[in-house]
Amino acid sequence: MLHFQIPFIRSWIERTVAAHAASARPVDALVEQLGFQRLPGYFDAAFLRRVRCVAVERVPLPPLVPAGLRRFSGFGAARYTGITYGDTYFVQRRHEQSESLHFHELIHAVQWDCLGIDRFIRAYARGLLREGYARSPLEIMAYEHQRRFETDPAPYGAEARVREEIASRFPRRA
């Protein structure tokens, strides 16, 4: 059933990102504005220039249940502090100062970049349905990197590492 809804979800994401384009800030500018010292040590400068962040009161979630995807009712009912759609992520305004939250969402931006919109949607949805949010493979990856960011002060190539993990865990089918 999900594969029939991917065009709807893709369209909703594109409209949502476009509707917030005027308030989206490049992450490299945000790093400077908010005084984040660590993010540039983990991500390529060009990536931080390309990815955008939007601070909102409430992160926008796709209307999955109204689209006929009732099995995702728990996803829409939750209150998230951040969410990523492609190269744009949204954070709750009250959590905008959290460098760790930005790091987590940047991990998702790398995942989106590697998988593309349709493969990301399928992989994320499959993980939610099979494992639930906390055990979803893409969330586990993001939280593991976030935990390392929070506990180990030594920077590492998080972007490159996630790209390797995606290539090995989500191989392209021929």
Image (cartoon, helix red, strand yellow):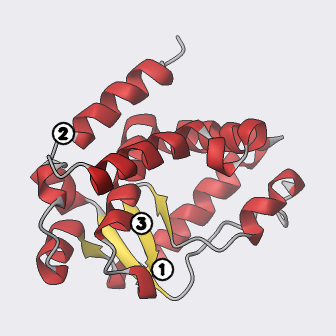
Amino acid type of the residue tagged 2 in the rendering: Gly
Picture coordinates of residue 152 (x, y %)? 23, 48
At horizontal 48% and vertical 18% (from top left) the residue drawn is: 171
Picture coordinates of residue 76 (x, y %)? 74, 67
Q: Quadrant of the N terminus?
A: top right
Q: Is residue 93 left or right of residue 163?
A: right
Number of residues whose C-alpha sits closer than 10 Å to that of mark 2, classed few (under 14), some (14–19) or many (20 or more): few
Amino acid type of the residue tagged 3 in the rendering: Tyr
Which residue bears the numbered disc 2?
157
Rendered view: 119 above or below 146: above
At horizontal 11% and vertical 54% (from top left) the residue drawn is: 45
The quarter of the picture where residue 119 lies is top right
Picture coordinates of residue 115 (x, y %)? 45, 36
Which residue bears the numbered disc 3?
89
Q: CA distance from mark 3 to mark 2?
A: 20 Å
Q: Secondary structure at mark 3?
A: strand
Q: Return the disc, 1 or 3, that comes first in the chain's sequence.
A: 1
Rendered view: 115 above or below 93: above
Q: CA distance from mark 1 to mark 2?
A: 32 Å
Q: CA distance from mark 1 to mark 3?
A: 13 Å
Q: Is residue 159 left or right of residue 13?
A: left
Amino acid type of the residue tagged 1 in the rendering: Ala
Q: Return the disc, 3 or 2, that comes first in the chain's sequence.
A: 3
Report the front residue among 121 and 12: 121
Number of residues whose C-alpha sits closer than 10 Å to that of mark 3, classed few (under 14), some (14–19) or many (20 or more): many
At horizontal 80% and vertical 55% (from top left) the residue drawn is: 72
Q: Are marks 3 and 2 in contact (CB under 8 Å)?
A: no
Q: Nearer the viewer, mark 1 or mark 2?
A: 2
At horizontal 85% and vertical 67% (from top left) the residue drawn is: 66
Q: Return the disc, 1 or 2, that comes first in the chain's sequence.
A: 1
Number of residues whose C-alpha sits closer than 10 Å to that of mark 1, classed few (under 14), some (14–19) or many (20 or more): few
Residue that protrudes farthest toward the top in the picture: 174
